[in-house]
Image (tube, rainbow, N blue to C red):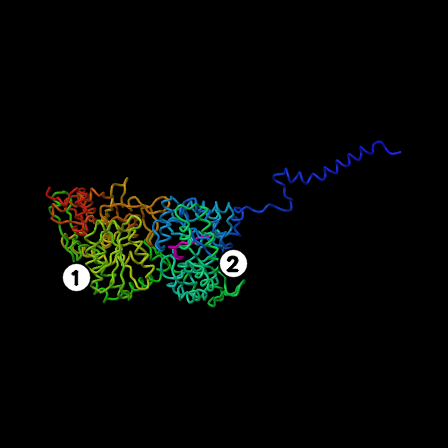
Amino acid sequence: MPSTRSPFVLVIFSLLLLLLCLLPLQNTAFATTPTPKPSTPPPPSPQATMSNTNNRGNARLVQAFEEARSKGTAALVAFITAGYPTRDDTVPLLLALQNGGADVIEVGVPFTDPQADGTTIQRASEVALRNKVRLPDCLDYIKAARAQGLTIPVVLMGYFNPFLNYGSEKLMDDLAAAGGDGFIVVDLPPEEGAEFIKHCQSRALSYVPLLTPTTADHRLAYLAQSAGSFCYCVSLTGVTGSRSDVPVDLKEFVSRIRAVTDKELAVGFGISTPEHVQQVAKLADGVVVGSAILNAIDSAGPEASSEERAKKVEEFIRELKGGAGKPGGAGDAGRVSHVGLNGNGKAEGEEEAEERDVTHRHFGQFGGRYIPETLVEAHRELEEAYAKAQADPAFHEEIAFFRKQYIGGPTPMYFAKRLTEVVGGAEIWLKREELAHTGAHKINNAVGQALLAKRLGKRRIIAETGAGQHGVATATVCALMDMECIIYMGAADCERQALNVFRMKMLGATVVPVESGSRTLKDAINEAMRDWVTNVQTTHYLIGSAIGPHPFPTIVRDFQSIIGIEAREQILQMKKKLPDVVVACVGGGSNAIGMFHSFRDDASVRLVGAEAGGEGLDGKHSATLSMGRPGVLHGTRTYLQQDEDGQILETHSISAGLDYPGVGPEHAFLKDSGRATYVAVTDKQALEGFKMLCKTEGIIPALEPSHALFTAIEEAKKLPKDAVVLMNLCGRGDKDMITVAKALGVNLDNIFR
């Protein structure tokens, strides 16, 4: 007899079976975060991957080159400027570079005063600075890109001053935390950057040195030794920017480097097309492209969205990567091994290069040689030629001949009797350097450096000028010695010193107005530096002040020291004692250091420099030693007018020759050591000094020494009548009459009304 419960049991069994079938569907439909099996941990986040010391910096960069080689291509190293064209574009562009096939990214840190950048990158940097992009923003961009999936290595590329202001160790810690891998510092050669490199190494971050065609063979080994991962090989002498062809001597250059190192080599500068990439990939492990990528961004149009710009870049990178194939396919095909390593695995001569002492380049913590690698050999040649000249009596005889027969020295020592009577107090004496040929002290240095250039066999001379006096002096000696002369002058200075521009042209010089930046002296120096980087093998840069990289501050000081030598002898002869105070105006500081140098060891003599206080210290000014902070600009470490991010501030002075945001490094040393005192003199006070000398002595001074005149007057008031204040009157004022008339509200077209 069948059971009466069978249908019920069958129903229960059917329901259980149905429930079992529905369970997987329930997990799929309703579970939002399924728990992974304990044996399968979740993949690490990009941030976690970046924070692993063993998988970042040197190791990650080397791995990127090795992976590219394993695929039969050179590594594509792609550059963009952070914050260009807008702040919001950078992260999408970083991701687009990776999506297009880039293997390594260089993020350019904007800087106000680049020395080795061509027009495209310079313009991008200016736009980024207007967008308020600074170094901390660059770190934030890398961090944000990592969070959105960027995995390829990233290095920061820029100039040293922003890095120095941030704090090297803090910067490295923050870069590592953001997911960065290393640094390319254009103006930090290893001998000046030993501490920086050491800090990189301790954090497994990569320092990437630049090697150039002008680098000597023994130095190539030294530079390669400092590389944490790869070497950046600059394909040509010049600034960044697209070129039509790859240099014909590139193979020879790369071979020279291969002979001393096994480090990965990436070649850059002037590479802009897939055809260029293909040619370079045959020789190098990596290919660097920068300006062409910025041009690709611009090709999207000024109104393009971030997505449209990123798409353009991704397409362009894919085209470039298509040309990166190496001959022979994957693996080590096409890679040339070195032949010049010794038994310790180091290149010949590395040990002695590593131990080189550069303290002679410095004045205490100031000075040095912070320059692009392209200029290193030129500075070595100049230093060597100057040492030989200093040891050659014939050179000193030649200098003495020109001082006496051409310049008109010794220039007079003059007691300003009426000025002293009007002021009261100490006697005021003037070293009449404005009576030198061309009307200023600048001719002393111009003659000396032109003679050095002849010894170097360089007949193309470039120079910067602010007030125009150094430009006139340089044009003068170039006419005398039959040399080509190119003068860079800020466009604003050309306008206020038009008479000197005309004088330079009459002397046969080419005058180039500089429209970038503040259009003043610092911008003229930047442009002259770019010229020198491009034409270093045929050109001498005749720097006009005691600024710049070693040995220029020493050379300029020595050529101008004739002022102090003569003044010391003259005042001792005429007063039978040393002066109580020596005063000179200070911009870059060539006339002042020339005047001070002979009195430096006389403890009884106070040295006082007069800086340009401009509108006042609460407004725009050029009082660098009074208000600035130490930093690096134009190849030297000195006091600078800079903001908290290390960007150089615009300055102001009524005198074009003092309108400069830095100062000679020896002045920085004299300030910090307490040997000299520096005071700020406003435009208004300088005009008071100008008018006082005109009315009491019948001498029209230049606006630059008018600052020193005001200071000398103030010093004399504080001293007894038997004291002596000695001032260097370093320039005459005919060049400044239009500026003075404008400042005093005089209309020269209606002067009798």
Picture coordinates of residue 378, whole percent (x, y) = 33, 62
Counting labels gives 2
| Quarter of the image where the C terminus is located | top left
The region drawn magenta spans 182-191
Picture coordinates of residue 529, whole percent (x, y) = 32, 56
Crowd tier of the residue under label 1, counting other residues whose Cα lies within 10 Å: few below 14, some 14–19, many 20 or above: few
Picture coordinates of residue 79, whole percent (x, y) = 43, 53
Q: Does residue 257 sit above or below 304 in this rendering?
A: below
Viewer-proximal residue among 742 and 634: 742
Viewer-proximal residue among 620 and 300: 300
Return the disc, 1 or 2, that comes first in the chain's sequence.
2
Crowd tier of the residue under label 2, counting other residues whose Cα lies within 10 Å: few below 14, some 14–19, many 20 or above: many
Q: Quadrant of residue 214?
A: bottom left
Q: Is residue 122 visible?
A: yes
Q: Does residue 691 sit above or below 489 in this rendering?
A: above
User: Which residue in the structure is indicated by mark 2?
Assistant: 68
**Helix, strand or loop at mark 2:** helix
Q: Is residue 370 visible?
A: no
Picture coordinates of residue 461, whole percent (x, y) = 27, 61
Question: Which amino acid type is shown beneath numbered disc 2?
Answer: Ala
Q: Is residue 363 left or right of residue 26?
A: left
User: Which residue in the structure is indicated by mark 1?
Assistant: 404
Q: Nearer the viewer, mark 1 or mark 2?
A: 2
| Residue furthest top as drawn | 4
Give the alpha-carbon distance from disc 1 to disc 2, as whole Å: 66 Å
**Helix, strand or loop at mark 1:** helix
Residue 302 among magenta residues: no
